[in-house]
Each structure stands twice: as structure tokens, then as C-alpha cells.
Image (tube, rainbow, N blue to C red):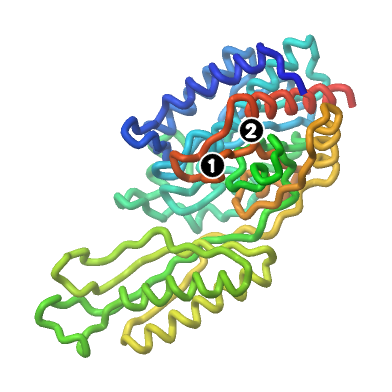
Amino acid sequence: MTVSKVVATDFAATFDKLADIGCDSPTRGYRRLAWTEEDRAAREWFAGQAKKRKLGYERDRNGNLWAWWGDPADGDALVLGSHLDTVPRGGAYDGALGVVAGFVAVSEAQRRGLKPERPVAVAAFADEEGGRFGIPTFGSRLLVGAIDPSEVLDRTDQEGIRLADALKADGLEPESLGHDKELLDQIGGVVELHVEQGRGLVDLAAPLGVASGIWPHGRWRLTLRGEANHAGTTRLDDRHDPTLVLAEAILAARSAAARLGAVATIGRVHIDPGSINSVPGAVDAWLDARASHDVTLDELVESVAAETRLAGLRNDVSTELVCESRSPEVDFDLDLRIRLKEVLRGHELPTPDVPTAAGHDAGVLASRVPAAALFVRNPTGKSHTPAESASDEDCALGCAVLAELVAEWMCD
């Protein structure tokens, strides 16, 4: 597939402007946590792009951003996009690539003289990563009614700021959050272009791949309570040390994941009181677990919980494992997948199916509207790190495929 110079130039220039926001110069990692100054700057960039490309701009009551080409009231809209927030020290492409590609694809369709017989939108969904309040795909889950706002508004970030207060400070009304059926009814399909968060396409020597589905996954909070004491004077036999239980929980998660062909990670830990010369009294940790099927995920989590309880009994430490969020197994819409493959095949590109264990807004929306995802090759195979990568050529190719999809959508 030949990508026009205009598309390639538009992609590179647009992506570079977004890449300046929230980047830490020494590490080249990104920090655009939801409802922060950096997140607001990225949203201002989005509004500026909508204005530049003569698209109608709005922010819905859940904090999601929309740039409309055509009248959304006409219905059956094609939605392109992803998210703008990042994990701490994240990569440049995760989420951002899909939003930039949406803008570039719509502009290419406009340059071809197409008219929005059916509306097209570029979307940036709010707080996809959940890096601040621990609620991933927050905006898209609110949109489809998968979250009860009253159950999460009192959650706090690491600085003790309540989610409700952060939303108010950002101009949102917590009491207005929730399912937006009217907006959903205007959507005919969603396609999220995203950097691949693995090396499947590298091994297949394919620049792009069509997502087949998403593994079920979730986050669980592990609470361990022992007894704080002096590190020098407290005998080993007299200790009630929750970090010992944490160590066994981490090993149990790794062992269960290996046995079940799944993945499990404890990547965030808070130890209290956090003193070098104190035996810890409490540990809060978070388990991220993902598996190919819901029943396998259940078995993994139950195994970790059981091993952790036994370790707690041995060390006289109380244990609790509570689910904070969970996403079911997703099969993407077959018709949209076929459409994407036909575009790829028409330009003599490979059409690999790529499953993923990473969560995406498109996966959440798939429960209510037809949805699909298109992955762009990641040469390093790494994500959620500054080492995440994609070539300008592959990214521009993804933009061109989306533009072809928009053109087809207009002609149906």
C-alpha cells in the first residue's frame, strides 16, 4: 500500500506536537495521569486539532472528548480514536497513536472530497489507564454503564485526593456521570488503532494486524495487616510481618500464571510505616491478572487468594483480596474485522489475527456497539515504558487504512 506524502507528513507533524506534552526529558517517559495539568494540556491539544480540521468539538458528561465530522444526530457514526492519558513513565504511542491516526484519517477523507453522508467522530476516552485512581477504561465504562459512579467516587489517589474532588476541579459534575444511551445510539461502529503491546506482528513481519479479541482481565487489591515493631529488638519468632506474606503472594501469582498459561503481576505496593528500621505493620498491594478465558482467570485469582491466606496463617497476618475492577473476555465484531482485512488485502498487505491481553476502550464499547481494533507493529515489543516504539511508516500506513475505512463507510 502506498501512503501519500500528505498523510505521512500530517501524521508526523501531528504526533510530534502531542508527544511534547507530559514527556520527562531525562527518561523520555510520559506522565499524563487523568485530571492533571498534563492531561488538560493534551485535551487542549485535542480541541485545537478539532478546530484546525473544522470538526465539531464536545466533551461529554463522563469526560470523553469528541470531534465530529457531520451531524452526530444522523446516527450510525463511525468512531475512531483511543485515549490520551498514560501510565507513569509510559510510552509515547499507547493511546496517543490512535487519536492522532483518527484525525489524520478524517482529514485525508476530507481531502478526497468526501462528504459525511454518515457522521464520523474522533474520540479520546477519559482515563483509560486508571493510573491515578485505579479504575481502567473509566470514561468508556461510564459511557456504556459498566460502572456505578457511586461506588468509585470516594476512591483516592496516592496523595489522598478523592476522585469526586478531582472531577469537580476539572469541570465535571460527579452526579451527572454514567450511562449515556443517547450518545451510544448514535454510534454504528468503533475502530481503535493502537500500537501493539507485544511482538506478535514483529515475529509475523507484518506492519498491521487485526485484533481478534481481548483476554479477560482485572485488578485486585491485596490487604495485609500484621504488627509494626522494632527491626533490631523484635525476635524473628515474635514478628507478624506482612511483607513475608506479600513475598509468598507474588510467588504464588507467578506460579499460578505459569501453570495456567496466564499472566499475573504485582506492580504496585505500599508498605506502612515505610521505615527502614521498623518491621512493617501493613501492606497494600495490587494484583493485575489476565487469562485466555474467564474460568481460567477465576482459577488463577482463587489460587493466589488461597496461597496468600495460608501464608497469612503461618505469619499471624490477616489477608484480604478484593476485586477493584474486572473486564470480561471480548470477541471483536466480525463484520468490522472483515472490513479491515479487506482493506489490507486490497493493498497486498498481510492480514494476521492478533489476540491481546491488554485492555482497550474498544473492548469496553464492544459490549454495546460493533467494535474492532487495528494494531501497529511495535519493533521493541515493549509497552508501558519509554522503550515502546513504532515507525512513522507503519503508523502512517495505519492512518491510510483508517482513511480507506472512512471512505467505505461514506459509500455504504
Residue 182: in sight, yes or no? no
Q: Three-letter amino acid code at disc 2? A: Gly
Residue drawn where x is 65% and y is 20% of the image: 104
Q: Secondary structure at mark 2?
A: strand
Tell me: residue 319, above or below residue 330. below
Of the residues shown, which amino acid type is indicated by label 1? Answer: Thr
Query: Residue 249: x, y in percent?
Result: 43, 74
Q: Going by the image, does 42 lie left or right of 282?
A: right
Q: Position of residue 140 (x, y in %)?
A: 61, 44
Of residues 93 and 361, which is closer to you in this image? 93
Q: Nearer the viewer, residue 14 or 133?
A: 14
- Where, by quadrant of the figure, is residue 1 drawn? top right
Who is closer to the viewer here, 143 or 157?
157
Direction from residue 15 to residue 211 in the image, left or right = right
Q: Which mark is residue 81?
A: 2
Q: How many marks?
A: 2
Read off the residue under disc 1: 380
Numbered disc 1: secondary structure: loop
The relative height of residue 135 versus residue 269 in the rendered view (above or below) is above
Residue 90 numbered mark, or none: none
Viewer-proximal residue among 15 and 53: 15
